[in-house]
Amino acid sequence: MPRAELTVSVPEGIWIGDVSRRFPAATFRVVTAFADDETGVGLVEIGGDDPATVLRDVGGHETILDHTVLYETPEEVLVQFETAEPLLLLPLRESGIPLEFPFEIRDGDATWTLRAPTEQLGALRDQFSAFGISFTLERLGAEDSLETDSLLTERQRDVLATAVEAGFYETPRRCTLTDVADELGIAKSTCSETLHRAEATVISEFADRTALLEEHQ
């Protein structure tokens, strides 16, 4: 499953965007949050040189319905909040993508990490557009090597790995298809067909991810 890293610009009028822009040195670490059709609630840690001053600004924002300080130190406060404007979370809800917590917001920009199928990430892009939220796709790729491996069958992985190790894909090639087949102890035709299927799967996945990246540039 693809892993996407986004920088999301919090729209004006959203409390956490407005306050973080007024206090650009402060860090807002959203521990958890969720939204329904009318309100959003969550927990946020506010860190910085003077979080108490930031907190007063939070309480004074017109979209904050309620807020409760759960703990407070000179360097950090943990706040439970309820807002009448949960716009930032709505694109995720509508596209069906779970958000990884915690995430940080600084100076109006949220840093998100998401794991979702490519088609759902495309739906999220459409939802961002519908809600007027701008974002930058910083990175898109496989979560780890096991994820990439899961695209292929065990036989396809073995044949592809042998071909790579033998230098079949180097320029100039250091071996032939016959050499790869002999190394594996299989027929040349079987080796060719297995490699072809593995290459098609890998290239198709790469093309899908590249297209999604280009759409966000």
Image (cartoon, grey):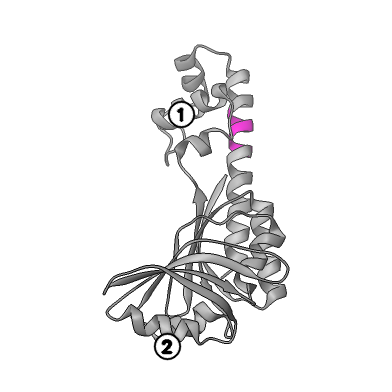
Observer-side mark, 1 or 2, equals 2
Residue 95 position, x and y percent, is: 70, 59
Residue 111 position, x and y percent, is: 46, 66
Q: Which residue is mark 2?
A: 22
Residue type, numbered disc 1: Ala
Q: Which residue is mark 1?
A: 161
Compared with residue 105, is residue 199 higher up or lower down, i.e. above or below?
above
Highlighted magenta segment, given as a residue range: 195-200
Compared with residue 192, is residue 40 higher up or lower down, i.e. above or below?
below
| Frontmost residue, 145 versus 64 | 64
Compared with residue 170, is residue 101 higher up or lower down, i.e. above or below?
below
- As helix, strand or loop, the secondary structure at mark 2 comes to helix
Q: Residue at 56%, 57% (x, y): give it.
A: 99
Does the magenta run of residues contain 196?
yes
Outermost residue, top side: 185
Q: Is residue 116 visible?
A: yes
Give the distance between the C-alpha atoms of the residues marked 1 and 2, in whole angstroms.
53 Å
State which tag comes first along the sequence, 1 or 2.
2
Residue type, numbered disc 2: Arg
| Label 1 Cα crowd, 10 Å radius (few <14 / some 14-19 / many 20+) | few
| Frontmost residue, 89 versus 113 | 89
Q: Which mark is residue 178?
A: none
- As helix, strand or loop, the secondary structure at mark 1 comes to helix
